[in-house]
Image (cartoon, rainbow, N blue to C red):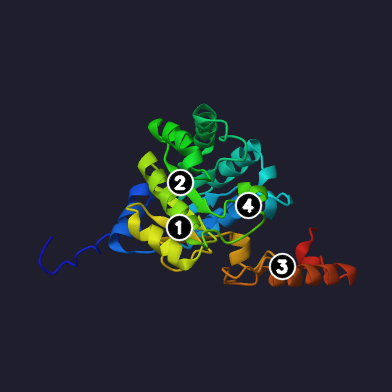
Amino acid sequence: MNAASPRPPAADPSRPSKVRIRHLQDAKDTGRRFAMLTAYDQFAAKAFEAAGIDVLLVGDSVGTTVLGYDSTTHTTHQDMLTFTGAVARSVSRPLIVADLAFGTYQGGGADALSAAVDLVRAGAQAVKMEGGHAILDQVRAVVQAGIPVMGHLGFTPQSVNALGGHRVQGRDHAAADRLADDALALQEAGAFAIVLELMPTAVAERITEVLHIPTIGIGAGPSCDGQVLVWQDMAGLSDFRGTFVHRFAEIGDELRRAARTYRDEVENRRYPGREHSFD
């Protein structure tokens, strides 16, 4: 290369060609925030990959956002395999994390490992479990088998009945201490990151400071290392308007407008026209 030749641009370490768990750790270590969104199908997955989203969560929330259930406890293992496969076949760059469905891991390490292996075979690169000390054996069993585990603390939707509904967790000192203890125990068991859901900002900040692994917030304030939202809430497709949700678009309004226009044009014989027909 002669002196006049321009140098190629340096690679951006914050935009790797394939996101791995080490990149999330690098983000925490360097103070770079990262974004995670749920995805359940090829169209959303491809759009989020093109937008540079680092992590796609195939959440058991597919039960409430796609399948019409009123709780994620109805989402089955087969549901998770189906939708994990759809996302995994559609993208290459994001880290794909899949939830272990309710009932697939509460029985112990062997059950958790079996379900996690199935999800990896479907295309997941990591799995997520809800809970603290009660699931440490399951976390260890899966991690020791070489499958990365993401934890989930605070409001844990699979325990909605035990928690008395969708409620902020950790409001008193004792509850906050339990959450911090659970977080440290999950880290010690080998979790590579922990989702913190519906907890006071100060509690999430405390946990984020004491952990060396990344935290990912949803209704946990701005101090977490990453953030996650259910994509239908983020894009204004769902009717959910929780305090912690910012609607970055109003896809629902646009979809209803398109459907009304389609209906009107069909009813008034404007669609299909000659340009949509064959001779």
Horizontally, residue 65 falls left or right of residue 54, namely: right
Residue visible at 38% across and 64% down in the picture: 33
Residue 95 spot, x, y in % from top left: 44, 49
User: What whole-number distance in Å separates the C-alpha atoms at marks 2 and 4?
Assistant: 21 Å
Disc number lying in front (1 or 4): 4
Disc number lying in front (3 or 4): 4
Kind of residue indicated by mark 3: Leu
Horizontally, residue 103 falls left or right of residue 55, namely: right
The mark found on residue 163 in the picture is 4
Residue neighbourhood size for the residue with mark 1, other residues' Cα within 10 Å, grouped as few (<14), some (14–19), many (≥20): many
The mark found on residue 153 in the picture is none
Label 1 SS: strand
Disc number lying in front (2 or 3): 2
Tell me which label, 1 or 4, sits earlier in the chain: 4
Tell me which label, 1 or 3, sits earlier in the chain: 1
Disc number lying in front (2 or 4): 4
Horizontally, residue 241 falls left or right of residue 121, namely: right
Tell me which label, 3 or 4, sits earlier in the chain: 4
User: What whole-number distance in Å separates the C-alpha atoms at marks 1 and 3?
Assistant: 30 Å
Disc number lying in front (1 or 3): 1
Kind of residue indicated by mark 4: Leu
Residue 139 spot, x, y in % from top left: 45, 37
For the C terminus, the quadrant is: bottom right
The mark found on residue 216 in the picture is 1
Report the residue marked by disc 3. 255
Can residue 16 be seen by looking at this rendering? no
When asked about the image quadrant of residue 84, the answer is top right
User: What whole-number distance in Å separates the C-alpha atoms at marks 2 and 3?
Assistant: 34 Å
The mark found on residue 150 in the picture is 2
